[in-house]
């Protein structure tokens, strides 16, 4: 029998962040395909009003059943409601309207340019450094997106009205992201997401039933499947992951993961919807991919150095 004292071996902590990032990218990029399916059989605003309302009811209902403590102040609840208008009602309301005449692949690509604008606004309002690498990366990102949009419009693949709605959608999520970091609501992200969905639903409902008709809904199995994914995978899980990444990674680094959406979105659109992808579209992704590297590399290095010293 050994008399040597036992030594406790420290357990290696599993880093769940890469898993969260991968799941977020898959859910967010596929949501463009599910949204395209949804707006084919249902008016966009009615689809969103139902999606937000059901998601909010489910989140807050589950919280009530679990008797979770309401740890949000009135100020935090109001902030989450404002974010619900920006990130849900405006972002998706404008985006889904654009999806009526824009392919899912292009819609995902345009919105994925949000790191370009978030990095600039983060430098102005959040004090995040805007280095020459970031500036170069932002220019490359904008050039890549502009190249693909120009090509799609020149060949008549996508309607310019839909592209304008999608660009307005992009502006909304950029504003919502900066507001989240500036206003910094405290408390449960889970309950906060429920408030956002309820606020988004209430904001969309008057427009949904004024500008659309329930009679335009075409009931189908694919509509039901798309709606289920949008509620559970999109409004509930993907948004929860998004705000978690914003808290953990910061505005610039977290938003940069949206640059991964174009290839994933085009892949899903090709596999599920049979959307045609040309070689020129893939060429446009090259400067965008290089842009994400230049924009996020300094932030990633700084974060790694900070973790290593703590």
Image (cartoon, helix red, strand yellow):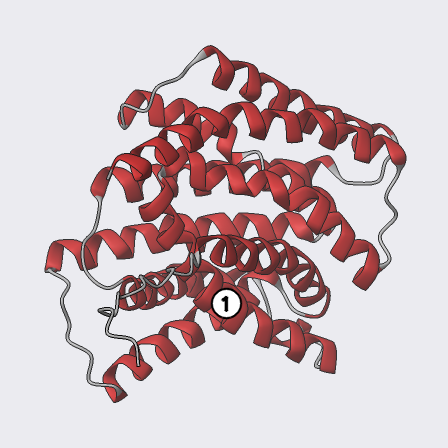
In the visual, does 143 lie left or right of 155? left
The extreme bottom residue here reads 65
Residue displayed at 66% across by 77% down: 225
- Number of numbered labels in the structure image: 1
Residue displayed at 25% across by 69% down: 4
- Secondary structure under badge 1? helix
Q: Give the quadrant of residue 76.
A: bottom left
Residue displayed at 70% across by 50% down: 265
Quadrant of the frame with the C terminus: top left
Q: Is residue 210 visible?
A: yes
Q: Is residue 102 visible?
A: no
Q: Give the quadrant of residue 212.
A: bottom right
- Say which residue label 1 marks: 209
Closer to the camera in the image, 251 or 209: 251
Position in image of residue 96 (x %, y %): 60, 54
In the visual, does 129 lie left or right of 23? left
Residue displayed at 38% across by 35% down: 304
Position in image of residue 238 (x %, y %): 48, 61
Specify few, some or many for label 1: CA neighbours under 10 Å numbering under 14, 14-19, or 20 or more. Answer: some
Closer to the camera in the image, 229 or 24: 24
């Amino acid at each position: 029998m050994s008399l040597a004292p036992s030594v406790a071996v420290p357990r290696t902590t599993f880093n769940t962040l890469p898993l969260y990032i991968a799941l977020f990218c898959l859910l967010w990029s596929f949501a463009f395909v599910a949204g395209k399916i949804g707006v084919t059989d249902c008016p966009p605003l009615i689809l969103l009003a139902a999606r937000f309302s059901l998601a909010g009811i489910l989140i807050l209902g589950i919280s009530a059943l679990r008797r979770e403590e309401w740890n949000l102040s009135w100020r935090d609840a109001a902030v989450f409601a404002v974010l619900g208008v920006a990130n849900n009602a405006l972002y998706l309301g404008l985006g889904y309207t654009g999806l009526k005449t824009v392919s899912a692949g292009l819609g995902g690509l345009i919105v994925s340019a949000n790191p370009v604008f978030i990095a600039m606004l983060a430098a102005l309002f959040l004090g995040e450094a805007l280095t020459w690498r970031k500036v170069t990366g932002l220019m490359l990102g904008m050039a890549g997106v502009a190249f693909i949009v120009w090509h799609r419009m020149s060949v008549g693949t996508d309607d310019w009205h839909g592209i304008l709605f999608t660009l307005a959608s992009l502006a909304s999520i950029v504003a919502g992201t900066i507001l989240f970091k500036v206003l910094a609501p405290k408390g449960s992200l889970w309950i906060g997401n429920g408030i956002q969905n309820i606020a988004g639903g209430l904001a969309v409902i008057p427009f949904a039933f004024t500008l659309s008709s329930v009679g335009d809904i075409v009931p189908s199995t694919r509509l039901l499947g798309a709606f289920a994914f949008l509620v559970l995978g999109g409004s509930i899980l993907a948004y929860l992951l998004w705000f978690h990444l914003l808290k953990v990674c910061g505005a610039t680094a977290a938003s940069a993961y949206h640059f991964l959406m174009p290839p994933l979105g085009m892949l899903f659109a090709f596999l599920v919807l049979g959307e045609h992808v040309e070689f020129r579209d893939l060429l446009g992704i090259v400067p965008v991919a290089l842009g994400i590297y230049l924009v996020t590399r300094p932030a990633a290095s700084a974060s790694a150095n900070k973790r290593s010293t703590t």
